[in-house]
Image (cartoon, rainbow, N blue to C red):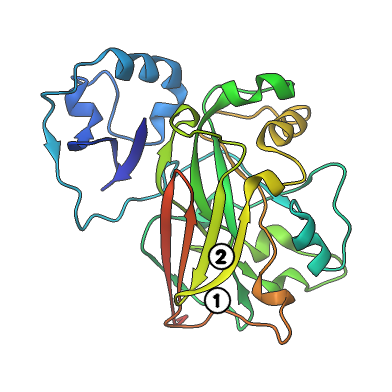
Amino acid sequence: MRIANLKDRLTLLTEGGAIDVEQESGGRFGADPQAVFAQWRAFRAWVSEADLDDAQAARIDGDSPGPPSPRPRQVFAIGLNYREHAAEGGYTGPTVPSVFTKFPTCLAGQNASVRVASPRVDWEIELVALVGEPAYRVSRDQAWSHVAGLTVGQDISARDVQYTGTSPQFSLAKSFPGFGPTGPWLITPDEIADPDDLHLLCTLNGETVQEAHTAEMILSVPELIAHISSTCPMLPGDLVFTGTPAGVGHRRNPPRYLGPGDELVSTIEGIGSLRTRFVTAD
């Protein structure tokens, strides 16, 4: 199952096109894309039982989907979760997750125009897991059952802000408006052959800058959920940015940063491609 946020309306994507969930369900599920996660089990049951063959499917050409979870209560993010990325920064891989947050106001969707907020704006492609069922003290073996779906994420960072002060400012540096693109839609794990091993590809103006597989993550999606939920109750609609592989601009020699006119495209196998354009800051 694929769902999207089209024009701020919850939309089910089928081979025939895009189905407006509120209209097709007769109001059982509302139009707000965020609200469905609090009803995730019931929504999945409805989709599995509904006769959608005759549904009024609209074309989606030209639409730019918004973030699948536009107003999550919590956004977790993981640092140094690929060994080569840790190594390019001079670190060893962690034995427990390095967890920080991106504040929800940074989220954006497909084809976002993001202002270059500093002279040292960097890119990171990330697999993003979205929580469906509440998770608290969940075991690794149970973790996938709490995941509503997966989407593509870009963890955009202002490196100058990140390294201001006596300790890194991860959360603020990664939370300027538009610094958390996600999308283009959400796909449930059962639609993916192996959700633990997905190919990642990130290009900048057509040039490959990052390429890896999620199987290379030091700590897998289930391990991350088990660790985070051992402390924090994870809520329906919450996001987990799972970390980025090697190839970020800040660690290149010389460093390379994003500027106005740049286009970043991040593609994850089985999910899709997320496109972001960068524009001059006000």
**Which secondary structure lies at badge 1?**
loop
Residue that appears at 51% across and 26% down: 132
- Outermost front residue: 193
Image quarter in which the N terminus is found: top left
Q: Mark 2 is on which residue type? A: Phe
Image quarter in which the C terminus is found: bottom left
Residue that appears at 85% across and 65% down: 167
- Callout count: 2
Q: Are marks 1 and 2 in contact (CB under 8 Å)?
A: yes
The residue indicated by pointer 2 is: 176
Q: Is residue 274 positioned above or below 251 on the image?
A: above
**Which secondary structure lies at badge 2?**
loop
Residue that appears at 31% across and 20% down: 47
Crowd around label 2: few <14 · some 14–19 · many ≥20 (10 Å): many
251 or 29, nearer to the observer? 251
Q: Mark 1 is on which residue type? A: Ala
The residue indicated by pointer 1 is: 117
**Residue 8 location in percent, x, y?**
30, 44
